[in-house]
Structure formats: structure tokens, C-alpha cells
Amino acid sequence: MIVYDRLWNTMALKGVTQYKLITNGISHSTLTRLKNNQPVNTDTINKLCTILDCRIEEILEFKTE
């Protein structure tokens, strides 16, 4: 299972708000999906890495169920 706990930590460390994500093309519904560890597409992952200027490992993690 992919979880996005690291996303929220990275956002806090970099001072990036959910508002900034929204103004840079991440929708409210996508944020809800991320909060609930539901699937998102690779375009979203790419946008998050670009906005946060980070590596993919800093926003998601795979955990065995």
C-alpha cells in the first residue's frame, strides 16, 4: 500500500501549504485522495515533486499490508 505521510511532513518542513498546492494545479479532490492514502496518477506525483522541489521518496512510501 502506498501512503502519503511523508508528503505532509515535507510540506511542513518546506513551509508549503495546501493552498499553494491548489494554486499550482492540485485539486481539492486530489488532496482528499492523498489524505486518505487513495491512488493518484503519476502526473500528480510529478506536480508534487516539482512544487516541493523534492524526490519522490519524500512524498510517498510503500508499506506492505
Image (tube, rainbow, N blue to C red):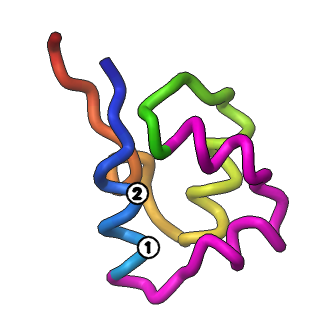
Q: Is residue 46 left or right of residue 27?
A: left
SS at mark 2 in the image: helix
SS at mark 1 in the image: helix
State the predominant SS element of the stretch in magenta. Answer: helix
Displayed quadrant of residue 55: bottom left
Mark 2: which amino acid?
Answer: Leu
Counting from the top left corner in percent of width and height, residue 38 is at 50, 26
Identify residue for label 1: 11
- Please tell me how many numbered marks the rendered image carries: 2
Residue located 70% across and 78% down the image: 20
Residue 32 lies in the magenta stretch: yes
Counting from the top left corner in percent of width and height, residue 36 is at 45, 35
Residue located 55% across and 70% down the image: 52
Q: Residue furthest bottom?
A: 15
Q: Which numbered circle lies on residue 48? A: none
Identify residue for label 2: 7
Magenta range is 13-34
Residue located 42% across and 32% down the image: 37
Q: Quarter holding the C terminus? A: top left
Residue located 46% across and 88% down the image: 15
Neighbours of disc 1 within 10 Å: few (<14), some (14-19), many (20+): some
Displayed quadrant of residue 44: top right
Q: Are marks 2 and 1 in contact (CB under 8 Å)?
A: yes
Q: Is residue 62 left or right of residue 40?
A: left
Counting from the top left corner in percent of width and height, residue 33 is at 58, 36
Mark 1: which amino acid?
Answer: Met
Q: Quarter holding the N terminus? A: top left
